[in-house]
Amino acid sequence: MDVADAVKNAKGGEVQFKVEKAGVVHAGVGKASFDEGKLAENIRAFVGAVAKAKPAGAKGTYMKKIALSSTKGPGVSIAVDSANVE
């Protein structure tokens, strides 16, 4: 993939994320310049995508905690119920 393809995909809404062995998922969902509504929409879309990707064999609570933070900033906990997309 060259730089032009990467830019095209990013502008098309592709989200890149990092997953740790312990099951922690890191992803960028917005910028500090985004308004509250846009950030909430992006967070709900990301949580919905993670919930849809749940393996069929997974039992119990799939998503236990959500924390939102700026780069190198303190985290703020978000109730999983309020972030879920029906």
Image (spheres, rainbow, N blue to C red):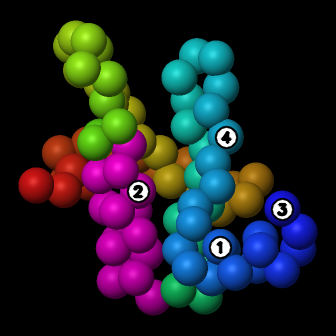
Q: Is residue 26 above or below residue 15?
A: above
Mark 2 vs mark 1, foreground winner is 1
Whole-angstrom CA distance, mark 4 to mark 2, is: 13 Å
Depth check, mark 2 against mark 3: the one in front is 3
What's the residue at 64%, 55% (across, down)? 16
Residue at 40%, 82% (x, y): give it: 38
Query: Which residue occupies the foreground of this view, 35 or 84?
Result: 84
Q: In this figure, which residue is indicated by the disc labeled 2?
A: 46
Q: Which mark is residue 29?
A: none
Could you say which disc has been placed on residue 9 in the image? 1
- Which of the two discs, 3 and 1, labels the residue nearer the N terminus? 3
Residue where numbered disc 4 is placed: 18
Kind of residue at disc 2 = Phe
The image quadrant where one finds the C terminus is bottom left
Marks 2/3 in contact by CB < 8 Å: the verdict is: no
* Dot 1 crowding, Cα within 10 Å, few <14, some 14–19, many 20+: few
- The local secondary structure at tag 2 comes to helix
Residue drawn at point x = 34 percent, y = 83 percent: 37
Q: Which residues are magenta?
A: 35-50
Q: Quadrant of the N terminus?
A: bottom right
Can you give x and y, in whole percent of width and height, for residue 85 in the image? Answer: 19, 56
Decide which of 83, 7 is in the foreground and name it. Answer: 7
Q: CA distance from mark 3 to mark 4?
A: 19 Å
